Structures are given as structure tokens and as C-alpha cells.
Image (cartoon, rainbow, N blue to C red):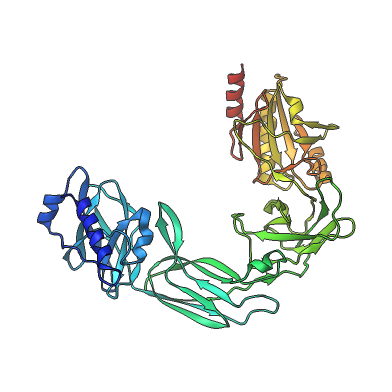
Amino acid sequence: MNVRMILLLICICVISSGCSQEPKSAPLTEDIFDFQIDPNRMTIATYKLVGETLPGTPKVVPAHSAAHALFERMGISYDIMQIDKNTWKGPLLLGDTYVIGWIVEDKKLFGYCSDPFTATKDIEVTFSPGLPATVEYVVSEPPKDVNVFPARFLLPIRTITDGNETYLSWGVNETIEEPRTIKVEGLAAGTYRLSACTVNFGQFLNSRTPFLYDRREIEIKSETFSRYEIIYPEVDTTVEDTDVTIRGTLYDFDKKPLPNQIVHLIPYEDNIRDPMMNLYYPSCTTDPNGRYEFAGVRPNIYAILNYEYTSILLLKESMTGGASISVNLRLGLNTLPLVIGAPAQNLVIDFKDGGEGKLSELTGKTVVVDFWATWSAPCKKRIQELNSLAEQFSERSDVVFIELSIDYDRAVWEQAVDKSDWNRLRHGWLDLDKNIYALNQKIPCSMIIDKKGILRAAGGDLDIKLELEKILKDAD
């Protein structure tokens, strides 16, 4: 009988005995290991405890189901045998990945105490749960006009599930009805996500009414006491000299101004994934001509202008202190798709040397398009390099280099080009009123379109010379 069969029988016995009984398994001995282990498929792992901790027992589970280690009576736990006070041994499948949990004497999982490890021949794993830590979360009296209660407090730990990092509940899930201090004891060392959020926050999102959204990662060390004060949202209504002003017009699908509509401004963190729920700007109602204005916006942040399902990302680089940004919102404006191997989207370009044109009119030529903005220093450096590259290809009439500005203000773009020496490039401006696409990606960003109008390469760190030479070689 092999180990898989033994484990299966153990699981059947545990399930049959009911959740109220402690799962039992026959203790393993070295002789049994030698008799049962297929050296081509399994190995005997040694687990060594280091450092001071609470009395307990290691629990070894597959890393892809690490969530099961949160519950002593759930999932497959590989049998182990204690060799001495701080050493255990047990069988593992070669090549599989595992994680160690630590079960204290009252059968509560104290924590993960090893990084995921892969079973190799005669592997030895050291682990150190450490001593439990304590966290206090102080909920103070909220500011006026901020919706807080009831709120939910969670403190999940970062773990591995299905090979990916995730956060799993530690059993800390409390409702906050009033200001008080929440004390959580018995925490293992690790990275946690502290989270406190108004329960019925959904009703406040569309109105941009401020509510509690305190979410942050905290690092807990063994045998420590940590105290965290609640962070309430800030309603930013002050206007300072270093702030940014954002103004524009809201248009419908037919480019007609939309009066008496609510436009939102939502600030974002640097990762541009999660909105900054702790920073709020009052919404703006468009005037009879569809105009809106946000004054006193904090500089050096990313922000999204939003009306219903239409949004435009304002890049951090444009939100410089004291800047005045002009940008319109038009229904139906989408993010420019950059799909390699597919036809490039047909952008309308306002050319600096006069008139407007479309990318489709350049079919039959290989086109290099570089997106930039006047406020981006990396873009200007990139343009100098492309200007030199365009010089090298100046004898080829079938290769075109276009610098396409995404500046919100056309006059600012034109002035910057007039002062430059980028005379080997063709310069254009992306007017969002003439296009259904906006570039919502970090710049500089470039793309190369072949003679058939197919997008062949795109990205922010593109080696344009290398990619261009490949494309031209394939075409010749």
C-alpha cells in the first residue's frame, strides 16, 4: 500500500468520524518510511524549528491549498513524526510545493512560518513561527459629514493560494458601531492588510459622498505591540497656489454640450489600480454650456475625470503644481487598444505642418508613432533619439516617423515644437474631440505599423531601431 492510499484512507476516516472529533493518524516510524517510500516519487523531509515560540506542532500542506491550513480539520495535512524537541520528519511528493503552518496547543493556527518550498531529495526545511504579536486599532470620533458607522474591520494575512499571493481572513471580522479600540492578540509575524470600510458604502460612490475606507498593508513582527490610528477621508475643498485647475466641456455622442450633468474627479494612487478613497473632491455640475471646473486639486497625483461610463486618465506628470489643464469629456471615448498583429486603429492626427490626416492614409509606408507630452522629460529624451534615428532613414521615403502629442492644450504643444530642433520628425497632435480613442498608458509609448497597416510592435521600452529593421527586412 503506497502513501497516497494511506493518506486517502486517513481522510476517509476523518470525514467519517465527523467534525467534532480530532483527526487521528498512525504515527510514522523510520522503518515504515523505508517500507512505504518510493524513492523515485517521494522523499523524507526534515523540519527544524528555530527560535522561541508557543508550544505546538507543524502542519505541512500543499502550497496550492494553503488556505486549508487555516483550519486544523480541513484539507490534507501530511503526516509527520517528531524526532526530538525541535525536529520532525515526514513524506512529501518530489517536485511538489508546500508550506508549513504552526498549530498551537489549543488547535488554533498560529501562522505560516515558512515560505513555499519545493520537495527535493532529503530536503531540510527550517521554520520559525516566533511569538505572538498584538495589534490595536483605534477608532476615533469621525469628522463631520464623513459616513462611517456601521463599518467592518478585517485583518487578513498575506498567504499563498493556487500559487498566487492573496489575503486570507485570520478570523478577525468585527463590526464597528461607534468609536472604540479594537484589540487583536495572537498574531503571527507576517504582512497583513488592515481594512476598515463603511458597510453600505455603495450608496455613496456615485455621489462621491465621503465614507470610511482605511486600507493599508502593515508588517507585524514577532512579539510586538503595534497601535494604529484610524485614517478618515479628507474632503479637499481648499485652494492653494500649488494646486491644479482642471476645466473642460462634457459632450454627448453627437458632440453636443451636456448641461446640468454631474462630473466626478477621482484621485488614484501611483499604481493606478485602487482609487484614493481617503481623498475626496466634491463633484461638479456642468453649466448650461456643458462646462465644468475643478479648482484646488492636489498636484502630483493621478486622477480620473468621470461621467457615468466615460473616463479620462490624467497622468501624474501633467498634474504639476500650479498647472491649468484643459480636457474635454466625450461619450464613447475609449482607451486606444494596442494589439500586436491586428490592424492599427485609425487615428485622426492634426499635423503641425498643416491640415489633418489619418493613419490609414499612410498605408504602403512603415510608420513609427511615438506618443509624448510636453511635461514629460523622458519623452523629450526619447524624441532626441528618434530624431537621430529618423536622420539615418532619411533616404527611405517608405518610412515615416510621427511624434504624436497627447497634451491637453494644443498651444502648449505647438510652442514646445517651435522651440525644438526635432526637424527630422513629423509632428502631430491627438485631438480627443476628433477621435474615439485616448491613450491611457504611461509615456513615452511607441508603436510601429507595417505597410499593410498592421501593428507590429508597441510599448514604452521598445527598441525602435531593432524592431524597425526587423519589420523592413520582412517586407523586402
Quadrant in the picture for residue 258: bottom right
Quadrant in the picture for residue 299: bottom right
Q: Is residue 143 visible?
A: yes
Q: Is residue 233 left or right of residue 86?
A: right
> In the image as oriented, which residue stretches furthest toward the top?
476
Tell me which residue sits at (66%, 42%) in the image.
444
| Percent x, y of residue 330 | 79, 49
Instruction: Compare residues 84 and 38 and report the one nearer the observer.
Output: 38
Instruction: Compare residues 309 and 54 and report the one nearer the observer.
Output: 309
Instruction: Compare residues 372 and 430 and report the one nearer the observer.
Output: 430
| Percent x, y of residue 86 | 21, 66
Q: Is residue 112 left or right of residue 294?
A: left
Query: In the image, is residue 347 above or below residue 238?
Result: above
> In the image as oriented, which residue stretches furthest toward the front?
16
Instruction: Compare residues 201 and 434 and report the one nearer the observer.
Output: 201
| Percent x, y of residue 454 | 64, 28
Q: Is residue 53 visible?
A: no
Tell me which residue sits at (20%, 49%) in the image.
43
Quadrant in the picture for residue 60: bottom left
> In the image as oriented, which residue stretches furthest toward the right?
288
In the picture, the quarter occupied by the C terminus is top right
Query: In the image, is residue 104 above or below residue 378?
Result: below
Q: Is residue 370 left or right of residue 70?
A: right
| Percent x, y of residue 378 | 65, 44
